[in-house]
Image: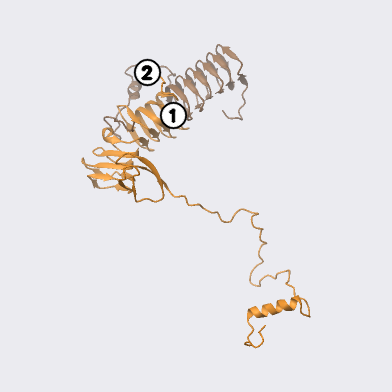
Amino acid sequence: MAKRGGPSVIDGLASVRAAQHAGRGAQGPRLRPSRTRLPAADKPPEAPRKPRGSGPASRIGHTAIPPRNEIVCYVCGYAFVLQGKIEKTYCPKCRHMLEMKHFVLEDEVGGVIRTIGTIEITERAKIGADAELVGGRIVVAGDARPARLRAGLSVEIRPGGRLEMERTTAPDLIVAPGGRFASASPVSCRNLTVSGEARARFSVEGLALVRPGGALCGEIRGARLVVEEGGGLKARVSVAKSEGANKR
Amino acid sequence: MQNSEEVKTVIGEDVEIVGSVKSASNVKIDGKLNGDLTCKGNAVIGPSANVKGNLNVNSIEIHGHVSGNVNARDRIQLKATANLNGDIRGKRLSVEDGVTFIGKSEVNPQGPSQRGPGQEAAPGGAEAESAEPVVEDKADVRRAGMLGRK
């Protein structure tokens, strides 16, 4: 309703207020909102809405968890964990700048590559004799025999991968499905995961894991052994909780 | 062993048997057995069991202590509390973390060989040679160094 003395304009809000006022106290018929809502002419009637919280959630919330990076300093060997996306970081111990880059080697490679990320040696890679590859994880799918490999976390052998153990240093050894590893001399490692074929005399400080489809032959000595259903084990085994387990 | 499979013979915790046991059905041992067990069905060696002898079974699930060779036609399961001192031979094997196992294993999903466990191959035989690690073409490793950091 327009105010007295004001402009003689009735906007939408004023008209609604006037109708409410007339319904509350003014004389005349009480105005009440209709309890039944008529369906729109062009739309089919909607199904009644369920009360909130009664059914399954229509929207699932996701919590973004930043990636967890295990890092081993290639200068001092200090291991630490950082979360989130990392390009560069400092070693908390030696304060050396560490670069997190992932390398996929497909061409001729020589010299030194240092990263706390992953180095993947593909089948097409031609590694020079002067190559030194230092990375967090090293994936060998090609001929890496001339190179000196040093992994802070693990070396993974994939099908077609070849390496020289004399020039390789890594705590964990992973034989990927289809990969083959054999050594005539004893091999010591922290953890061993076999999804392919491994044939050697292993001494494992941590866990030796044979995955389904994997086969471990030769000898295995360590503290923990897990053979999953479908894994093969044809070896002399000495797995005991105490260190003093005698070899049979 | 599956829970649905019926165990007809149970050797209780307070029972000690000296001698061989033969059974055509499933067996569960919770007590002591000083002797061999031959079972056409499946066997369960309970956590409190102590077996000193060879076990010839279809499938076996070991929770307790076994000193002897295990020969299974199908599956061998070594549970976390198992303590096995002997050789095993079977078709399928699963080993849980925490097992104590000292012996030789010959488990191949393709099927076991004809020799029994504990029987060595003839010196110079084909399998005796293959038991030693050999250098494969695809992973040409001449000398193994220390992989891990001490």
**Nearer to me, B143 or B136:** B143
Confirm whether residue B72 shows in the render.
no
Q: Which image quarter holds the C terminus of chain A? A: top left
- Vertical arrangement, residue A33 with respect to residue A132, above or below: below
Q: Chain of mark 1?
A: A
Q: Chain of mark 2?
A: B
Which residue is disc 1 drawn over? A224
What residue is rendered at 34% in x and 21% in y? B128
| Chain B color in figure | brown
Q: CA distance from mark 1 to mark 2?
A: 28 Å
Q: Quadrant of residue A217?
A: top left
Q: How far from the left and from the top, in percent, is residue A236?
A: 39, 23
- Vertical arrangement, residue A160 with respect to residue A237, above or below: below
The residue most toward the right is A28
What residue is rendered at 64% in x and 54% in y? A55
Q: Secondary structure at mark 1?
A: strand
Q: How far from the left and from the top, in percent, is residue A239?
A: 43, 25
Which residue is disc 2 drawn over? B121
Q: Secondary structure at mark 2?
A: loop
Q: How far from the left and from the top, in percent, is residue B48?
A: 56, 21
What residue is rendered at 48% in x and 52% in y? A64
Q: Amino acid at mark 2?
A: Ala
**Nearer to me, A57 or A6:** A6
Which mark, residue A144?
none
User: For this view, does A166 lie left or right of residue B121?
Assistant: left
User: For this view, does A119 lie left or right of residue B75?
Assistant: left
| Chain A color in figure | orange
**Nearer to me, B12 or A137:** A137
Mark 1 surroundings within 10 Å by alpha-carbon count, few (fewer than 14), some (14 through 19), many (20 or more): many
Q: Nearer the viewer, mark 1 or mark 2?
A: 1
Q: How far from the left and from the top, in percent, is residue A110?
A: 22, 45
User: For this view, does A200 lie left or right of residue A112?
Assistant: right
